[in-house]
Amino acid sequence: MRAGDAGGVYVAPEEVGEPLVLDADERAILGAWADRLVPGDGSWPPATATPVVGYIDALMDRAPSIAPAVRSALGWLAERGFGGLGSDEQVAALRELEADPTLGPVFVSVLEMVLEAYYRDPAVEAVVEARTGFSSRRPMVGTPLPPFDPARLDRVRALPPRHRST
Amino acid sequence: MTQIADVLVVGGGAAGAALAWRLSQHGADVLVLEQGDWVPDDDIPKRHADWQVRARRYWSPSAARRGWPADYPVRNLGANPVDAFVYSAVGGSATGWGGAFWRFLPSDFRGATLDGFGRDWPIGYEDLERYYEINEAEMGMSGIAGDPTAPPTPEAPLPPVSMGAMGERWIDGFERLGWYWWVQHQAIASRDYRGRPACTNNGHCTYGCPTGALATPANTYWPEALHNGVRLQTGARVREITLDTRGRADGVLYHAPDGSVRRATAPVVVLAGNGLGTPRLLLMSSSPAFPDGLANSSGMVGRNLMVHVQTTVIGRFPQRTGADHGPWGATATTRHFYETDPSRDFKRGFIITAMRGFDPLDTALQTAGWGEGHHAALEHHLNHEAVCWVCGDDEPEPHNRVELDHERVDGFGLPGVVTHYTLSENSRRIGEAGIEKATELCYAAGADSVRVLGFDTLLGWHLLGTARMGADPADSVVDAWHRCHDVPNLLVADGSVMATGASVNPTHTVQALALRAADGIWARRRDG
């Protein structure tokens, strides 16, 4: 398993609450990191408008094996004064982190966790539907569709057989 | 306490369920040991608003990622490692499948004779024909007869599932190209069928069907089998097949969930653990008489792993693609390039199945880089993409294999498995041709660009060939009636017996084989 990847461990939205693992400084760095990954853009909210930090904290609590890896990446950013950097400098620091042979896999794991928490947020789902037409409710409730018209097969049905006899 | 039965089956998945049901119809006393458990309805991701997250966490098809209590460790190596997808549960890996339901073609059983490819099966299409028909009725297949790329068949029990606008767009593409194509046959109820409701086009079928319209062994064969008296023991991790003094199988030892070791005996033992689980158990059952693994005098147990030459070509369309609805594995498929064509530089062929688009989370992960521009990229791709899935015939090769992994053990200290897989040159050429033709289809259907998944890691839905069927005991593990050459009352009745794997989803054939194996067991029940 990739460093920082909690694998099959699942945390439901209602299970994300008070921080359990990360301290205030770590949460601040993680929040700034998340907002550089998914910045606000027009009607799209930034990552920290959704419970991304709480979600990662809860996953670290439920899957303690990922905590050292995530903490090492947060420490790497703290050493560079990440929270006090301008946005361009923060992006540059994250590019460096992403390319780091040791911490790069942790970066990917954090990105995945951020996207999970972000795209399951009801407010983001509403923007997704408004902007793209994709309704996350439809796969739960279904969509009426007309039946298939067999006449569409008329050309192919008239073709000669195309399989080998044995 | 020892449990005793007429037939003992290891594995309650697609094959084990069908075999147990068929034997129970005959009146046999059947005990099935399944390492997993029933999947609670509430675990089905699409019953929940955050189905996309659940699908890639606890519902992940990758055993290496998911980590259910019944899972055993799976590690994947080779130049093209397989991301082995298996579910340890009642229903097996059809717990998280899409329902694609294919018969093999007659030529699929004669690869060596026709094409110098792999091994001929010791049985042919005609041996499975009646079992395909039974399976289509039991699973509730939707489709339509008359496909000129296959032998004539009876009409499907149910009409085709709905296409939707994206399906019609794909069909327009097939028609522009003049290719053979046909509606994808699906184990999905297009109308109410035997207590299962008609499909409501929820889409994203592998994330679990919230209505039960998608057939699984758990909602088709199992209820009837249990009604007929089949005993199903869940949470039973079989650790060893035991032999009597004559060298015949007499039962198994298994771990109950509390860790205790228990015994079950029967005059006939059937393995239905598919391409990973079956060779794992045979290799774990070594003894002085079988030092290299039970029933492995040929050395073929675990060898010849076939996974199909699988990749996806994803078309991006100017119009919305309706990615939030419609049976995901359907719309239509072409077998235009299925049979060997001497003008091409490879043997055998491939199918292209035209499918639907990804969900927001998957689209973000695949296409939208982080930072400024993330949302613009998402909007460009989401609900504007649809997938062409390429599936080609990979030749059985001994170096593609499953071995025990003694470095990683399960919760009972039993070894995991490691797979080794490298695409052959023939498979690479099939893959390249499949990508080329799928790209052609995307543009014919109106795509403005395509992206290709490639072959760095292979999709591991189909795990076949690791205890193959053959007439020669020196070159195969089981005979035409699924009996191990070395231990005749030990049978293998799952995808691992396939001598070659064809170019289509194998579940229908796996189940047809299991039904036939059951009839063979019943016919020989007094042979001793």
Image: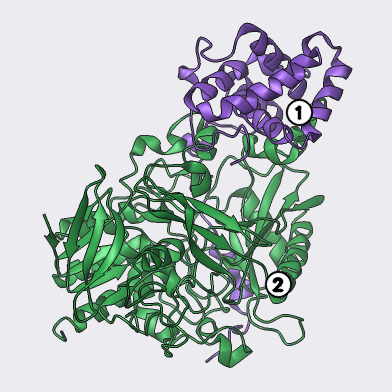
Residue A121 versus residue B449: which sits nearer the camera?
A: A121
Which mark, by number, is residue B375?
A: 1
Tag 2 residue: B430
Picture residue at 18% right of the left edge, 67% below the top: B24
Supply the letter of whichever chain is green.
Answer: B
Residue B300 versus residue B306: which sits nearer the camera?
A: B300
Which mark, by number, is residue A60?
A: none
Judged from the image, the secondary structure of the residue bearing numbered disc 1 is helix
Chain holding disc 1: B
First reached walking from the N terminus: tag 2 or tag 1:
1
Residue B88 versus residue B73: which sits nearer the camera?
A: B73
Q: Quadrant of the N terminus of chain B?
A: bottom left
Instruction: Quadrant for residue B14, please give it.
Output: bottom left
* Side (left or right) of B500 relative to B12: right
Judged from the image, the secondary structure of the residue bearing numbered disc 2 is helix
Residue B168: % across, % down: 64, 55
Supply the letter of whichever chain is purple.
Answer: A
Residue A13: % across, % down: 50, 21
Circle 2: residue type:
Ile
Circle 1: residue type:
His
